[in-house]
């Protein structure tokens, strides 16, 4: 499985959000490209299935076969409902820009975006509301009130250690602080994953999404010690042995380990605290195949769809899904997540991410040796 899509998918950045604001649509029609005032939540699942079969296709963005095992889900939808599928791989910001630019000439029906982009898509009036029959199984933090966006799977910040270089793999932030190896989080000036690594450290040392300073201070101290690596924690660099310890989403860490050598790397969720985030589906308001898109979301949140995601090392959002033991064994043990938490104030975190590049440049990068 290839996870090279990770960094492109993870970029947030002030410029991207500004671009989306500029693309805001003034069209207030609700529903598909016809502009009909339709409340899709009033449709039965049988009605959605019937209409989906007539549409005959679903076109996604940012949901390629090799990311989180989407390929198996698209295959299932093809087999069960005869839906043809195509995907165009792109970042979250690019997905929203595409929805906004094409409007009623839509070529995309559904997309998968970082959770921060769900509210932005809703604010820009780009989404079609559909809750699915599994709505009550979704945690409140992982969905909006009306079904404009909903998280399908989560990632939690984890340590991945190359045992060829690290004798005692860190299990906690305290271990990380007292180690002698180099630590990589990637480019915190632009990468979403790296910025969440700082937030996870902030949680561990008394901060939060409103106060990122403890996380900045932690990595500044590593930099002063010559222990902050400038290397990108990509699968290629991990395979070449250029990374000692990296902070990655758990699903990326697990995917990379499986690609390279399952016995070579240790993965742990830091014991004191970590941060959990997720990726959300958004259905294009202007979709030409809205029922097929709704059926895709329905299937993604079904037991089978959640199992497919777990096969791709992504942690299902529905906690009541009973995964087969062979699939459950692909994921990290549940007890590792006892001190992991989602972002408490999403708006505050959005504001903080705009400040991180300058803080990182002025307080951390100046010390990198």
Image (cartoon, rainbow, N blue to C red):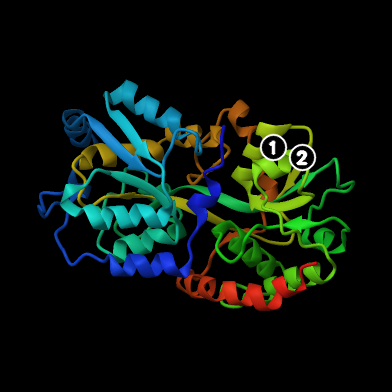
Count up the numbered dots: 2
Give the residue at x 75% y 40%.
Answer: 240
Marks 2/1: CA–CA distance: 6 Å
- In the image, 175 versus 21, the foreground residue is 21
Q: Residue 341: give x, y in percent of width and height.
A: 59, 60
Tell me which residue sits at (46%, 60%) in the image. Answer: 141
- Name the spot of residue 7 as percent of width and height, x first: 55, 51
Whichever of callouts 2 and 1 sits on the residue coming sooner in the sequence is 1
Check if mark 2's residue and mark 1's residue have beta carbons within 8 Å: yes
Residue 302 placement: quadrant: top left
Element type where label 1 sits in the image: helix
Up-down relation of residue 107 to residue 156 (above or below) = above
Residue count near mark 2 (Cα–Cα under 10 Å), binned few <14, some 14–19, many ≥20: many
Within 10 Å of the Cα at label 1, are there few (<14), some (14-19), or many (20+) other Cα atoms?
Answer: many
Q: From the viewer's perspective, tell me whether residue 305 is left or right of residue 230.
A: left
User: Can you see residue 149?
Assistant: no
Q: Is residue 77 above or below residue 221?
A: above
Q: Residue furthest top?
A: 79
Q: Quadrant of the C terminus?
A: bottom right
Residue drawn at x 18%, y 42% as measured from the top left: 288
Query: On the rendered structure, is 108 left or right of 196?
Result: left
Q: Is residue 83 visible?
A: yes
In the visual, does 17 lie left or right of 219? left
Pick the front one: 65 or 203:
65
The quadrant of the picture occupied by the N terminus is top right
**Residue underneath mark 1:** 257
Secondary element type, mark 2: strand
What residue is disc 2 on? 265
**Is residue 195 rendered to the left or right of residue 247?**
left
Residue displayed at 61% across by 73% down: 208
User: Residue 192 in the image: x percent, y percent?
Assistant: 54, 59
């Amino acid at each position: 499985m290839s996870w090279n899509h990770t960094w492109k998918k993870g970029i947030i950045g002030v410029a991207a959000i500004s671009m989306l604001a500029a693309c805001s649509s003034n069209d207030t029609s609700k529903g598909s490209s016809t502009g009909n005032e339709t409340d899709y939540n009033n449709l039965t699942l049988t009605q959605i299935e019937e209409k989906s079969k007539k549409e005959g296709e679903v076109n996604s963005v940012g949901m390629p076969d090799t990311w989180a095992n989407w390929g198996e889900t698209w295959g299932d939808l093809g087999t069960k409902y005869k839906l043809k599928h195509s995907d165009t791989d792109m970042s979250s910001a690019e997905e929203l820009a595409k929805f906004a630019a094409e409007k009623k000439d839509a070529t995309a029906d559904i997309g998968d975006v970082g959770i921060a982009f769900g509210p932005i898509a809703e604010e820009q009036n780009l989404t079609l509301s559909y809750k699915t029959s599994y709505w009550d199984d979704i945690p409140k933090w992982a969905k909006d009130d009306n079904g404009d966006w909903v998280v399908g799977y989560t990632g939690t910040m984890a340590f991945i250690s190359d045992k060829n270089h690290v004798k005692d793999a860190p299990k906690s932030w305290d271990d990380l602080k007292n180690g002698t190896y180099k630590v990589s989080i990637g480019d915190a000036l632009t990468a979403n994953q790296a910025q969440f690594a700082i937030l996870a450290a902030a949680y561990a040392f008394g901060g939060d999404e409103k106060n990122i300073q403890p996380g900045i201070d932690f990595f500044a101290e590593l930099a002063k010690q010559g222990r902050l690596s400038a290397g990108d924690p990509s699968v290629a660099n991990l395979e070449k042995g250029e990374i000692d310890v990296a902070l990655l989403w758990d699903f990326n860490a697990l995917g990379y380990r499986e690609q390279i050598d399952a016995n070579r790397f240790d993965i742990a969720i830091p014991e004191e605290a970590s941060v959990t985030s997720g990726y959300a589906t958004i259905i294009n308001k202007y979709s030409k195949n809205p029922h097929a898109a709704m059926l895709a979301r329905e299937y993604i949140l079904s037991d089978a769809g959640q199992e497919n995601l777990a096969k791709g090392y992504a942690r299902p959002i529905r906690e009541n899904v009973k995964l087969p033991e062979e699939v459950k064994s692909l994921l990290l043990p549940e007890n590792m997540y006892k001190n992991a938490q989602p972002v408490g104030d999403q708006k505050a975190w959005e504001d903080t991410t705009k400040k991180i590049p300058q803080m990182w440049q002025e307080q951390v990068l100046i010390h990198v040796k």
